[in-house]
Structure formats: structure tokens, C-alpha cells
Amino acid sequence: IQLTQSPSSLSASVGDRVTLTCRASQGISSSLAWYQQKPGKAPKLLIYDASSSISGVPSRFSGSGSGTDFTLTISSLQPEDFATYYCQQFNSYPITFGQGTRLEIK
Amino acid sequence: QVQLQESGPGLVKPSQTLSLTCTVSGGSITSGYFYWSWIRQPAGKGLEWIGRFYASGSPYYNPSLRGRVSISGDTSKNQFSLNLTSVTAADTAVYYCARRTDVHDAFDVWGHGTMVTVSS
């Protein structure tokens, strides 16, 4: 299953609301997770089951979608949110990741 | 709190076998609730799932690696290992081990990653 993220990169300002998109090549129900990765660090889980939040992740991060179309929304960007974001599907093997969206400071 | 730590050579010669170990602390690899994976990331590129070890079932591998990969577990040491044969420069990457749970159905714990370079 191929995951396509858009945009590939995005410039935004602190306080902005941003929405990142992940589209699956076939339906994956809600078997989608979102990760944040900063340079030199391992990815960090933000959202699982498309819309469920992980304990300790700020509430400004939210996920939605099912089937083939998914979104990750950051309601008010903070300086620490500038990073690369990946979606990932667990619906079927092999597990696959999207190519990432790089979120940069404007 | 569960922690994962990758270890192994940082440099491997072309055509040889890349071998890495992930040591798990704070939890058991034999628990039926957890699946243990290897994931890699070439410099400046995205994430690629390599395969997984599951103590209560068969391993799964990414077909893209065309039979070069094997993953096994050592329950006595609470470790799982990756072997990747016939490596080329394209296998140069940061290699991560990670845990997936049935609860989250996602990779909720990751190692810090280890850089492996394939070069003569």
C-alpha cells in the first residue's frame, strides 16, 4: 500500500493552523499513525488509529480520516513543531510510510 | 519504562552481511502484546520498514529486500537481531529498532538509531 503525503514541504509561522494530508493507494480503514521526526532523532508517535492521541502529546495535534484520506492538523504552531511528519499504515504487510512532509519556519 | 538500544558495526564492506542487535530493557520481547521491528532511513530520505520479530508467531519481512533479510530473537538476552546479506551502498542508512503494540497499533517506542555505512 502506497502512502502519498502532501505537501512535501510547507512554510508556516508560529501560531498558524496547518493541515497535512496522507492518501493511501487503497482503503486502510483507520489503520494509520502519524509521527514527528526532528533532525538526528528517532520518530515520535503522535497519533494512532487515525485520530487517537498519545498521552503526553499536546492537544494542538489532531488526526482524522478513514479509508484512503487522512489529515494531521496542528491547531496553533509552536516553535518546537517545526519538523518532518510521516504517516504510516498498519492495515497490511509490508508496513509502509509516506515520504514525509517537512514543516519549516516562514 | 521500555527502552530500546541498537548495537553493531558502523561500517560494513560491500557484499558482506550487516548484523545489528536491539537490546530491550524494561519489558520482555516474549510478551504477546508486542511486535519488534527494524526500520531504516537513508540520509535525507524517508523511513523504510525492514521486518519484524514476534515471539508468538512468524517473522514478517519487506519483500523489497528480496530475501536478504532475517530477524530473530534471543529471549535469554531479551534481544532481537537483524541480518541483512549481500549489502551494497544502497543499504547505508540509520537503522532503528522499534516496538509496536496491540494497544496503539503503532510504533510507540523507538531506539535512538545506529548509523551503518556500507563501504570498502
Image (cartoon, coloured by chain):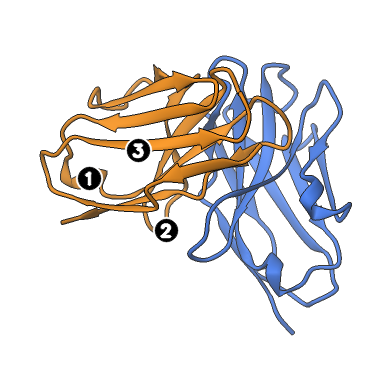
Chain colours: A orange, B blue
- The CA distance from mark 1 to mark 3 is 17 Å
Q: Residue B114: x percent and y percent?
A: 58, 58
The three-letter amino acid code for the residue at tag 2 is Gly
Chain letter behind tag 1: A
- Judged by depth in the image, the label closer to the viewer, 2 or 3, is 3
- Check if mark 1 and mark 3 are on a common chain: yes
| Left or right: residue B33 compared with residue A5 | right
- The tag earlier along the polypeptide, 2 or 3, is 3
From this view, report whether residue A104 is shown above or below residue A61: below
Proximity of marks 2 and 3: CB atoms separated by less than 8 Å:
no
For residue B8, side relative to residue A89 (left or right): right
The span from disc 2 to disc 3 (Cα, nearest Å) is: 22 Å
N-term mark: 2 or 1: 2
- At horizontal 57% and vertical 28% (from top left) the residue drawn is B26
Mark 1 highlights which residue?
Answer: A80
> Residue at 70% of width from left, 74% of height from top?
B89
* Residue A40, numbered circle: 2
Q: Are marks 2 and 1 on the same chain?
A: yes
The quadrant of the picture occupied by the C terminus of chain B is bottom right
Query: Chain under label 2?
Result: A
In the image, what residue occupies the spot 38% across and 29% down? A71
